Amino acid sequence: MNASNFWMLRVEAYLIYRRSLGYKLTIDEVVLRGFARFADAIGDQSCLTMPLAIGWARDSDRDNPFTWARRIEVLRGFSRFCLRLDPATEIPPSGLFGPSHRRLIPHIYSEEELIAILNATNNLLSQHGLRPATCRTLFGLLASSGLRISEATSLTRSEVDFEAGVLCIHEAKFLKSRWVPLHPSTTQSLNDYAQLRDQIISHPTCNRFFLSDTGQSVKRANILYALHTICRQLGWKPRGDYMHHRLHDFRHTFIVHSLLRFYQQGIDVDHSVLALSTYVGHARVSDTYWYVTGIPELMAIAAERFERYSQEVSNEQFAD
């Protein structure tokens, strides 16, 4: 085996194995490739040891324990794979540098902000005139359905059923598929976009539903750039812990607003959140609760429910 790529080949084998089980490992791939370059550069081919793991974890531009802990967490999965090949492999312990997860607060778009974003797409520069409509329809779809951006950009024409008003999402996260019913207004917006798209792009290069001005599949990076351009033109700064507005915040917004609507309409939240979890394609309902971020309206409802609960407990104790 070539001494210069010993660890890179082992990382490739690990990624192939894990992806065969349905994992995409987009972030893990970047992290582990970094480890492989580090380990191959120093020429350590013996086995994965604690000194090697710690040395790589701390060799980061971000000199903080949280970053080191995140690196170790990714390396732990890879090290278990290496243990099958080399029993001398040392698996770094969990919590070596402290916690590896923290809950960052996302930006929850208000209704006014969503409308402003949709309107601002008209000002986006476009070579053939399709870009504003593509961005506007995509932003609207993300906000009204909670789709992941990868699910939206991967849609094909046959997966959008205008008559039934549903989307067929194939092989999303963990290779799961599901049907996503749409509000009639969303279906109409998609239909309007499809007609304009076919007028502007008569000979597309692919069968994707959302296209760029060149007739190719629209890319996530281009949609994110459009969002940043709009937010910069509007003079907005994100609320929360992230430096920039994110496409994923549309998904957070959909889930939070849905929960708020359940409360306002007097719907049983504990049961409805199960349906919401299925709708957005979560494997566990706990994943849906992870998205819930305290906004003033939700905090007021939570406080009211807690006060009512406390009063009921107090009354029961008094009755006893």
Image (spheres, rainbow, N blue to C red):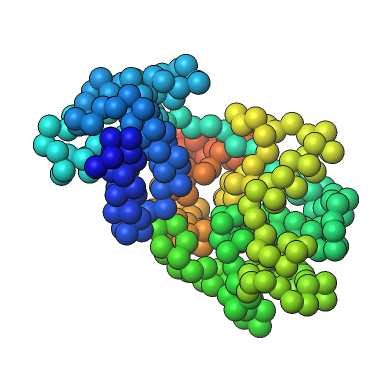
Whole-percent x and y of residue 9? 31, 44
Q: Is residue 253 above or below residue 51?
A: below
Q: Can you see residue 168?
A: yes
Image quarter of residue 128? bottom right
Q: Nearer the viewer, residue 52 or 253?
A: 52
Q: Nearer the viewer, residue 78 or 139?
A: 78
Is residue 247 toward the left or the right of residue 180 in the image?
right
Whole-percent x and y of residue 303? 55, 34
Is residue 52 toward the left or the right of residue 179 in the image?
left
Image quarter of residue 130? bottom right
Whole-percent x and y of residue 51? 25, 20
Q: Nearer the viewer, residue 212 or 312?
A: 212
Whole-percent x and y of residue 182? 63, 69
The residue furthest top is: 63
Q: Is residue 100 above or below residue 193?
A: above
Q: Is residue 223 above or below residue 151?
A: above
Quarter of the image with the N terminus in it: top left
Name the residue located 64 percent from the left edge and 42 percent from the top edge: 246
Name the residue located 41 percent from the left edge and 62 percent from the top edge: 175
